[in-house]
Image (cartoon, helix red, strand yellow):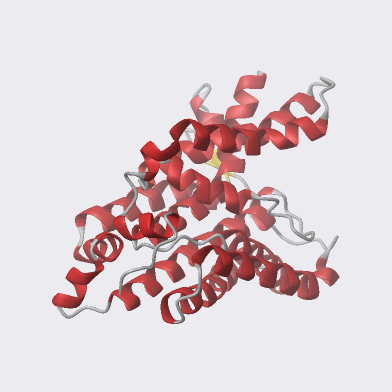
Amino acid sequence: MSILLDVATGGVRGGTSILYAGVGETVSERAGVINLGTEGSMLGGACAAYIVAAETGNPWAGVMVGALAGAVLAGVHAVLVVKKGANQFASGLAVLFLSLGLTSLFGSSYVGRTISPFEVWEIPGLSSIPIVGPVLFSHDPLVYLSFVMVPLVWYVLFRTRLGLLVRTAGERSEALEVHGYKASRVRMGAVIVGGFFAGIGGAHLSIAYTNSWFENMVAGRGFIAVALVIFASWSPMKVFGGAYLFGSALALGPALQARGIGVNQFALHVIPFVLTVVVLAALGRRTISSAPAELKRVFENAPSGP
């Protein structure tokens, strides 16, 4: 297998956790709330999923508990920001530190413990297609689920009444109040849904991608997901491609190592984060200007609407 094929295949596998978190964060930011605690929701999801998978032997049970753990942590952020009016950036970081503490406490005894992880499902016929087969159709079931999840979230956001409520909460929250809806409830729901997806992303990382648990294993993927949403202009479909781009950056190191190519590992580890900074610097204010109106107020450090 060529190095390009290795990187592309690894990009899909490694980018899936970022994809789930990025799509969840898209829902949250479309409602006008940025959540730097996405990293914490991913970490909580990874730890909870691994613990449950280890205790029950059922990775699907792990995914569900991991998703709930991510949602609960995001719910803390939602209460602090929407109900208590806390600074969104400070609250998100506080949730991250809370997650770091909780996962260190409850996950320490599971470091090095083996589980029954998700197995690779080869799609009959499709997985044997040259190039496309290994890249798209030889993965664990959470990867395939993400193929369905992204267009489904796009459809809900842009083609349903529920999606209209979410987008209105992020653009003109006063319009919701006029029509009898509580913008605060819509925002809280969107943030919690975002955490739910981030929890699935963390679960994928621990019980499908690495098949292991260790402290702070998310290693910045949640922050990459938040930056990716801005890079993708708050579009779930663009998040799709962006997640695989960053996943490919993460996969480059193992692909080079497998071929005995001597490259400084610290330099390889920093590539995704350098890519994040470069993309954000290139997009600059032009992209921020297209953000939902309520989110612009956050970026400009102005008070939020109702």
Quarter occupied by the C terminus? bottom left
Residue drawn at (40%, 53%), measured in percent from left and top? 149
Q: Position of residue 59 (x, y in %)?
A: 63, 64
Residue drawn at (65%, 18%), measured in percent from left and top? 2
Q: Is residue 165 left or right of residue 209?
A: left
Q: Looking at the picture, does residue 92 appear above or below residue 158?
A: below
Number of numbered labels in the structure image: 0
Q: Is residue 78 left or right of residue 211?
A: left
**Whether residue 168 can be seen here:** yes
Quarter occupied by the N terminus? top right
Q: Position of residue 277 (x, y in %)?
A: 58, 37
Q: Looking at the picture, does residue 274 appear above or below residue 120?
A: above
State which quadrant residue 253 falls in. top right
Toward the viewer: 236 or 80?
A: 80
Q: Looking at the picture, does residue 245 appear above or below residue 118?
A: above
**Whether residue 123 can be seen here:** no
Residue drawn at (51%, 51%), measured in percent from left and top? 226
Q: Looking at the picture, does residue 168 appear above or below residue 257?
A: below
State which quadrant residue 40 falls in. bottom right
State which quadrant residue 182 falls in. bottom left
Q: Position of residue 51 (x, y in %)?
A: 72, 70
Residue drawn at (57%, 42%), measured in percent from left and top? 15
Toward the viewer: 206 or 103?
A: 103
Q: Position of residue 190 (x, y in %)?
A: 38, 67
Toward the viewer: 60 or 36?
A: 36
